[in-house]
Amino acid sequence: MKASFKFSASFYFIIFLIIFISSQISKVNSQGSSTDSCNSNLKLKSEILFDTTSFHCLTVWNQQDYILRYMRTDTNVWSYVLSAPNTNSYIAMGFSEKGKMVGSTAIVGWVSNDGTATMKKYFLGGQSPNQVLPDEGNLQLVNFTSSVVAENSRIYLAFQLNTEMPSNRLIYSVGPSGMLPSTANYRLTEHQDHTSTSLDYNTGQSETKTLYANLRRSHGLLNMFGWGILMPIGVMAARYLRQYDPIWFYSHITIQSLGFILGFAGVISGLVLNSRLQNNVNRHKGLGIFILLLGCLQAIAILVRPDKESKIRKYWNWYHYITGRVLILLATINVFYGIHLGNAGSSWNAGFSVVLVILFITALMLEIRMWKRK
């Protein structure tokens, strides 16, 4: 009995540990050291090649501390200065008609380790690196006005566009640290993070645009409730309601079946979302499919469950217990991972964490009660 108690308590302790680690990662990600602000005029030692005194200024990406200054400086000339932390990575600002990265044209800048500043225009024809073409795209840069400045731990991307009205669907991205484009072919590595926004040029208001927001939300909630909440509750029903036979069995089957249905719908919605967004989320996708496979194996195991008197019943029990707990552990990790990939924010992390803490405390109290009773 003591061994059983230790196993169950250890399992929920792992979940609690995952919650703690996730909260610490969120805190680290939210912390930034900004030396630029819209509260003051832009003053740099290295001069930008056009006047920025009266520019509109706004924070366009809080998570990465991106600040954009812009203004219409001539009849068909729009001027921009994008400011971001210098993390030894490229920064990019893309102009897209539909808010999607594929098909957009981006202005990308970086400063190499030897201090060489580089700015390039890229056309994003697809997701693979060979489809991201340097010096291509539909943006017309004003000659001899572009510059990249690195000062005060930040990088400033300054350029002017020849256009009557630029696209208001803007995409910002940041490259992986230490992986700058080489001068041989200027090929870009895949971005580390990105966001899609909509800018009202008249009011200076920027709004983050989440593509397929309802489908994203449905995908997250279905998996969170199905795999991450109902499955642990079903396990608790089977473990702590044994004295109420056969209520515990039917409760366990009902809760797990509902969790499986919601989780199955969540995985399918995720596959649909991935086909539309065409994002590189192979780890999250692969883990989700593996979790679904474990759920299917659990459902099949119920159909071939041997009688209590069978000699192989104990082996079936071991398989059922271990598979179920592995499923829950992986699902918990994947839900947090999905929240991170989707930039869903701290509210999703906090909400799911609170539910897991409640389940952990409840399971711990029931485990102690069962241990004392026996």
Image (cartoon, rainbow, N blue to C red):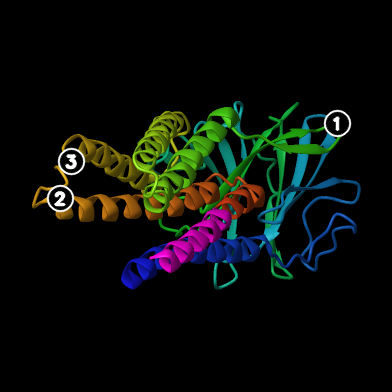
Q: Whole-percent x and y of residue 20?
A: 56, 65
Residue under pointer 3:
305
Q: Is residue 301 left or right of residue 148?
A: left
Residue 78 place in picture, x, y as percent: 77, 37
In this figure, which residue is indicated by the disc labeled 1?
A: 202
**Label 2 amino acid?**
Arg
Badge 2 local density, few (<14 within 10 Å), some, or many (20+)?
A: some
Q: Amino acid at mark 1?
A: Asn
> Foreground: 23 or 312?
312
Is residue 189 visible from the viewing direction of this image?
no
Contact between marks 3 and 1 (CB within 8 A): the answer is no
Which one is in front, 284 or 56? 284
- Position of residue 39 relative to residue 335, above or below, is below
- Cα distance between the residues tagged 3 and 1: 67 Å
**Quadrant location of residue 112?**
bottom right
The residue that mark 2 highlights is 313
